[in-house]
Image (cartoon, coloured by chain):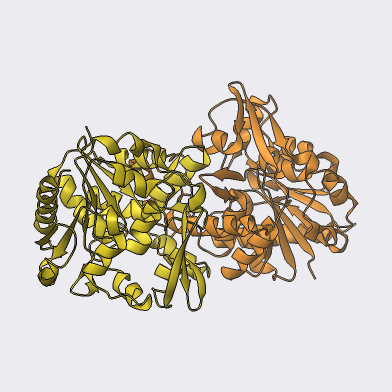
Chain colours: A orange, B yellow
């Protein structure tokens, strides 16, 4: 029976996800993944966060790039550039097979959940990866230069424009993935992995009823801080916080999640915050360099969760 | 001013097309190409005959395979096969860039003519390649095993099922490419390249009004036989003729085109037929192995055409 649910966005979330997956079986752990940064590009439905977790769990991920596959070739992209085509979003030749398969399944009427299940099964992943919703939710990043579709902000413009806020287009009509509904009552822990709270986790939390449903679950909700010593290990979290005029601190992340949280995991560099938060907090090495780092943080988070069972 | 129009299908047509393009400038020669074997596959609009001519004229064609690009890699296809995806139609990584660009242009409202012009210009091709029509025409091959979409017959089933006839779905609603309409009156010759008469040339000829328009043109219409000594150099022409219970001969091809033709080019192996046809006939080496063979056949065909000016 699924007893642990991990909420993930991109690379940071997938790192802890891999640690959790090395400890817990596919029958014990499931993932719910942000789809707010999904987009339609050159005819493909691309789900960057689902793919990051998929490639990470199947050990195909490219550790240097932080996205895509390790065993990749780039003939398609080279040729598209020669044609003067859109090349800001890098699509490897092997990666394209995944996008093509998913898009073809969606075109033939499958849900994103069904397409994801097929792909992850084909790659030998034993853990279920659930898109947060089968309805489209599209993150728009509001910036001082105007609104930007998430991938335009994140990839094309490399997070340069200063952020003023976020919109999640379609969220009012989105429903939580129905696979998760029956699950929430029987969980031992819900772990918010160290992903960007604004653009990786909030899309899930802002689906109507989801925040309430997570709070109503008997399982404690624990977040692992994506901010370490005032910086984000990867991605624009700290930059966004400064632009939004909030302190780029782990405490601010905990505050952002507010009463949803039952526990918080701080990095060793932020140990000074340990007794300053209103909720139970544990200090761990959250910077994950090696596989063992991932497993150790996963184990520490699970141990912490067990002390919080409500 | 365009004075020569070459009608082409796949590989054989493109060979003579290359010879013609080496003799005549882009301002003198245009191509009209079969789109009856176009199809939608894995989300792409694929135009095999246009692509064969495009790759041939840009000298990117793979001479060993007879389709696709020479400088190709296969990571996409390998990975799609690992996923259990549809792999009977081989799509190279670089080739995919062309299909993606075309499909994206069509999705954004361009015509196939516009997409083809963009792609061929990007590849440095000076000659205009006109799809026979901007409306979809899809060849169905009727076989003793039932009807088959053209690429299923041709590629997936390797022309194995015995043919009983052909249908060109959509042809009643198709119009000849409007770029050709003004052209027909000022031509010096119309050359039907050595392509399959049933599935490469007939789709064009069966577009409403096209056969009449070609006949009405002051330019002589010359066909180069795709049948040499009772065999097709490439493709299923001879096999189809046997299955349709007609002799697999060059004379039969000339008869198939009937009163459309003003002249016919026979191969040296069929020199015995020279004085047996009702129309002016010339004998040439139509088997094109080298580039010089292509140029020589093109020159011979043009010289022959000039003797036929009506």
Q: Is residue A225 left or right of residue B67?
A: right
Q: Is residue A223 above or below residue A250?
A: below
Q: Is residue A91 left or right of residue A139?
A: left
- Where is residue B299 shown, x and y percent of the image? 10, 50
| Most distant residue in the front direction | B278
Q: Which of the 4 image quarters holds residue A242?
A: top right
Q: Is residue A1 above or below residue B75?
A: below
- Where is residue A177 shown, x and y percent of the image? 77, 55
Q: Is residue A27 left or right of residue A161?
A: right
Of residues B100 and B305, the one drawn nearer to the viewer in this rendering: B305
Of residues A175 and B12, the one drawn nearer to the viewer in this rendering: B12
Q: Is residue A249 above or below residue B142?
A: above
Count of numbered labels shown in the rendering: 0
- Where is residue A25 shown, x and y percent of the image? 70, 71
- Where is residue A56 shown, x and y percent of the image? 56, 59
Q: Which of the 4 image quarters holds residue A271?
A: top right
Residue at the spot x=83%, y=59% of the render? A307
Residue A195 seen in render: yes
Residue at the spot x=85%, y=57% of the render? A219
| Most distant residue in the top direction | A144
Residue at the spot x=56%, y=39% of the render? A151
Q: Which of the 4 image quarters holds residue A169?
A: top right
Q: Is residue B81 left or right of residue A215?
A: left
Residue at the spot x=17%, y=43% of the render? B310
Report the quarter where the N terminus of chain B lies. top left
Residue B88 seen in render: no
């Amino acid at each position: 029976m699924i007893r642990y649910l991990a909420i993930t966005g991109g690379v940071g979330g997938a790192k802890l996800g891999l640690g959790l997956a090395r400890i817990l079986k596919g029958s014990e752990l499931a993932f719910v993944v942000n789809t707010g940064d999904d987009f339609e590009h050159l005819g493909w439905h691309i789900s960057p966060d689902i793919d990051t977790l998929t490639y990470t769990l199947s050990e195909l991920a490219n550790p240097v790039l932080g996205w895509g596959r390790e065993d990749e070739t780039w003939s398609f992209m080279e040729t598209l550039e020669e044609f003067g085509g859109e090349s800001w979003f890098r699509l490897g030749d092997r990666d394209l097979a995944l996008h093509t398969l998913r898009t073809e399944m969606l075109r033939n009427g499958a849900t994103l959940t069904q397409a994801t299940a097929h792909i992850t099964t084909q790659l030998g992943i034993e853990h279920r990866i659930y898109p947060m919703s089968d309805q489209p939710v599209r993150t728009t990043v509001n910036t001082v230069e105007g609104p930007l579709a998430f991938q335009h902000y994140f990839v094309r413009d490399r997070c340069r424009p200063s952020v003023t806020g976020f919109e999640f287009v379609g969220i009012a009509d989105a429903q939580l993935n129905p696979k998760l509904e029956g699950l929430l009552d029987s969980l031992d822990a819900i772990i918010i992995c160290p992903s960007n709270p604004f653009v990786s986790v909030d899309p899930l939390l802002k689906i109507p009823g989801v925040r309430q449903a997570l709070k109503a679950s008997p399982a404690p909700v624990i977040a692992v801080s994506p901010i370490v010593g005032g910086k984000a290990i990867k991605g624009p979290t700290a930059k966004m916080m400064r632009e939004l005029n909030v302190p780029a601190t782990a405490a601010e992340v905990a505050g952002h999640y507010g009463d949803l949280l039952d526990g918080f995991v701080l990095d060793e560099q932020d140990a000074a915050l340990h007794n300053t938060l209103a909720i139970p907090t544990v200090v761990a090495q959250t910077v994950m360099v090696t596989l063992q780092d991932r497993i150790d943080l996963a184990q520490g988070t699970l141990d912490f969760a067990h002390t919080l069972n409500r």
